Image: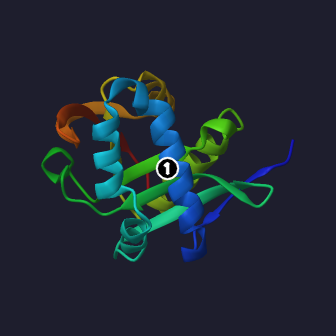
Amino acid sequence: MDAVIVREATKEDLPSILQVAIASYEHTFAAFNTRENMDAFYAENYTLDKFIAEFDEPNSILFVSCRNHQVVGFIRLRISHEADEHLDGKAIELQRLYIHPDHQGIRAGALLMQRALDYAVEHRFDWIWLGVWERNYKAQAFYAKHGFMRFSEHVFQMGDDPQIDWLLKRKLSN
């Protein structure tokens, strides 16, 4: 098996990252949502223009996992103040961690998570936090394995369907 490498993303990676995002999202959420809500979500959030704008957003960074020079997963970190009232200190949000369904089980997610944790510690963040759908049990188990604990929840709008995301946090040691 060829090794998985993690590196900082470039703008040239964005079309591949978008493909991974859609494939992963379909695999995880299509069975639980209407086609209309999935398509509405993609139209608003998963376009190349949107990903380019996010790439250029200050205080954010994107890492990719690659196998055979192919992007198979990605992780996006950003400064977001949504959880500030719950966290004492400097926090960074893990906004997305997606692995293409055809490449799950090759440690691409674990390697991306480790890179994100290293980045957060290197930049002296006290906390890393994220939102995960209350019914995404596989992701919840992954995050628990990496030391994340639930601290709150918020509404995540999926088309016309308000859904609940659990907010998870992990204290970082600097």
Give the x, y percent position of residue 57.
35, 74
Count of residue discs: 1
Who's the residue at 45% across and 67% down the image? Answer: 61
The amino acid pointed to by label 1 is Ala
Callout 1: SS = helix
Q: Using the rendered view, name the quadrant where residue 56 is placed.
A: bottom left
- Above or below residue 26? Residue 136 is above
Binning the other alpha carbons within 10 Å of mark 1 as few (below 14), some (14 to 19) or many (20 upward) gives many
Residue 123 visible in the picture: no
Residue that numbered label 1 is attached to: 21
Residue in front for this viewpoint, 125 or 33: 33
Point out the image quarter for the N terminus: top right
Give the x, y percent position of residue 120.
44, 58
Looking at this view, name the residue that lies furthest to the front. 36
Residue in front for this viewpoint, 74 or 130: 74
Looking at this view, name the residue that lies furthest to the right. 1
Residue 162 visible in the picture: yes
Give the x, y percent position of residue 46.
39, 56
Who's the residue at 59% across and 68% down the image? Answer: 13
- Left or right: 148, with 150 as reference point: right
Give the x, y percent position of residue 166.
27, 32
Who's the residue at 55% across and 54% down the image? Answer: 19
- Left or right: 172, with 16 as reference point: left
- Above or below residue 100? Residue 11 is below
